[in-house]
């Protein structure tokens, strides 16, 4: 699996963006939140992404998969080689990471934080009539 393949796969998700940060790390984001990282200066390049806790525990038991530096406590893993897992497994795990992050990101939401403005119920307005004082 190549860097270009991972890049094009990550950018294939709705609202996915990329940004080079921290000098040499390609960050893939949705709604401003990172769902995958690709360290370009590492030889070989390293891929990092978020996992479900059960999957995290299984993955870090495998050779060349470690808790991601600084992010392991949030259940992120680091693949020390891009070919450590079969391509289909890597794609599925990146897709799961995207799904978890997109669910928490503000993608498609209004400024009020509500995705569907049809569900907003109108508030009762106070009556403007005043009783005359005698």
Image (cartoon, rainbow, N blue to C red):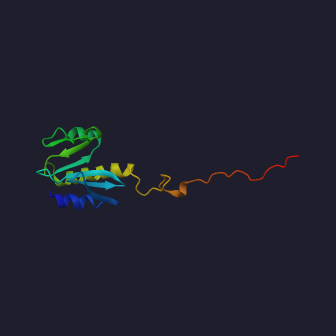
What residue is rendered at 28% in x and 62% in y? 12
Q: Point out the residue furthest to the right here.
A: 134
User: Which quadrant holds residue 59?
Assistant: top left
List x then y, in percent, for residue 4: 18, 61
Pick the residue in front: 50 or 132: 132
Left or right for 64, reference 109:
left
Which residue is nearer to you in this view: 24 or 69? 24
The residue that appears at 19% across and 39% down in the rendered structure is: 60
Nearest to the observer: residue 104 or residue 22? 22
Placement of the N terminus among the 4 image quadrants = bottom left
Residue occupying the far left of the picture: 43
In the rendering, at what x and y percent does residue 47 appear?
Answer: 19, 50
Q: Is residue 56 above or below residue 82?
A: above
Residue closest to the far front? 23
- Residue 45 lies, in percent from the top left, at 14, 52
Picture quadrant where residue 15 is located? bottom left
Q: Which residue sits at x=59%, y=53%?
A: 121
How many badges with numbers are in the image? 0
* Residue 65 % position (x, y): 16, 43
Relative side of 114 to 74, left or right? right
């Amino acid at each position: 699996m190549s860097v270009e393949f991972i890049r094009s796969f990550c950018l294939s998700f709705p609202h996915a963006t990329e940004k080079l940060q921290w000098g040499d790390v390609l960050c893939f984001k949705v709604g401003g939140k990172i769902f995958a990282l690709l360290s370009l200066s590492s030889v070989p390049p390293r891929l990092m992404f978020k996992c479900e806790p059960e999957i995290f525990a299984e993955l870090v038991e495998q050779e060349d998969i470690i808790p991601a530096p600084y992010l392991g406590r949030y259940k992120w893993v680091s693949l020390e080689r891009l070919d450590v897992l079969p391509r289909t497994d890597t794609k599925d795990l990146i897709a799961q990471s995207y799904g978890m992050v997109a669910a928490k990101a503000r993608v498609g939401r209004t400024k009020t934080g509500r995705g569907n403005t049809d569900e907003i119920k109108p508030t009762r307005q106070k009556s403007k009539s005043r009783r005359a004082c005698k």
